[in-house]
Image: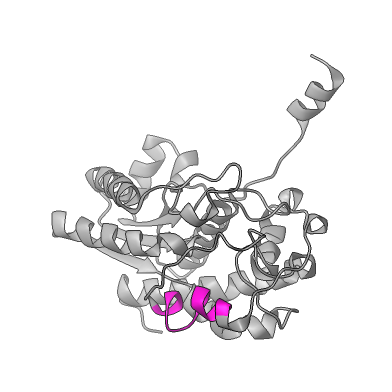
Amino acid sequence: MNDKNEALRDVLLYVQKGPAAMTEMSSHDVARALERTDVVLLPFGALEAHGDHLPLGADSMEAREICRRAALQLEADGCPVVIGPVIPFGTSNFHLGYAGTVSLKPETLIALSRDVCLSLYQSGFRRFVFVHGHDGSLPSMMVAAQILVEETPDAEAMVLNWLTPLSKVYHTIQVSQATEGHGGEGETSRLLVTHPELVHPDRSAPFHVTREEMRKLQGPEHIKTGGAIFYSTRKYPHYYIGTPGLARSETGEKGYAVIVEWICRVIKRDLFGRTE
């Protein structure tokens, strides 16, 4: 083995903080957890291009971190949950022109989600919380949740779109006042918090679309309120929108705080009957 291979073998890519998700737990650990709760948080990610400054798995990393932080807060509030396995692929067809992107057809993602949930149902989970890291998968997540409760009458499922509360405060926590979206300042900031070794803002340049285009992509009448509009974004010369170079870890922390507070409030209210 040459010196280069030695260096690659020993490099520490990133550190994952606890608590453990199901992937890091043993079967015995999961059985013990089920004695305390039947609620499972499922992080839905993606493997898609985010520019040269972010890893392909950024959405999966974000979704898992959101669930990790939510699980810690919910435990502190006496509402225990289990972090389920990350669903690592999503519907990412609009990024297929960029190397490494993997996209599932909507029907494939629905079937995959159904099978994962039915397997966890067999283990004893009854309340399922779908947490996205990639909004392009939201329509399929909603259908999968609907199918799950149709096939298992004693199960409950909710799909949480945290873009809604976050979009209301973006302008107060970000530096940029221009159009920021996929792979931009906000997302880059959140990855700086958890996986700084994998973030390289210096490899990016500002790229913005018009506000009219941004409304079409992420407008309040569409994906942020549970609706959707679909059209190709392959015409854009870059696979991110915004100014990643403005990213700061403190911005990421503020974003995570908004997301997690909202998710925990909804889960405590709707699954644990806690309204305080």
Does 219 lie within the magenta span?
Answer: yes
Is residue 274 among what the camera can see?
yes
Does 120 lie within the magenta span?
Answer: no
Of all residues, the one furthest to the right in this rendering is 3
What percent of the width, then of the height, locates residue 204?
77, 59
Q: Is residue 249 above or below residue 92?
A: below
What percent of the width, then of the height, locates residue 256?
60, 69
- Determine whether, in the image, residue 13 is placed left or right of residue 131: right
What percent of the width, then of the height, locates residue 116?
31, 45
* Camera-nearest residue between 138 and 51: 51
Q: What stretch is highlighted in magenta?
A: 213-225
* Camera-nearest residue between 140 and 263: 140
- Determine whether, in the image, residue 236 is placed left or right of residue 202: left
Q: Going 53% across and 48% down the picture, which residue do you hit?
A: 47
Image-quadrant location for residue 246: bottom right
Image-quadrant location for residue 255: bottom right
Total marks placed: 0
Q: Is residue 52 above or below residue 9?
A: below
Q: Main secondary structure of the magenta part?
A: helix
Q: Is residue 113 above or below residue 100?
A: below
The quadrant the N terminus occupies is top right
Q: Going 38% across and 71% down the picture, which residue do you hit?
A: 267
Q: Is residue 114 above or below residue 241?
A: above
Q: Going 51% across and 67% down the picture, which residue do you hit?
A: 73
Is residue 152 among what the camera can see?
no
The quadrant the C terminus occupies is bottom left
Q: Going 31% across and 70% down the picture, which residue do you hit?
A: 271
What percent of the width, then of the height, locates residue 87?
43, 48
- Determine whether, in the image, residue 226 is placed left or right of residue 188: left
Of all residues, the one furthest to the front in this rendering is 235
Of all residues, the one furthest to the top in this rendering is 1
* Camera-nearest residue between 251 and 29: 251
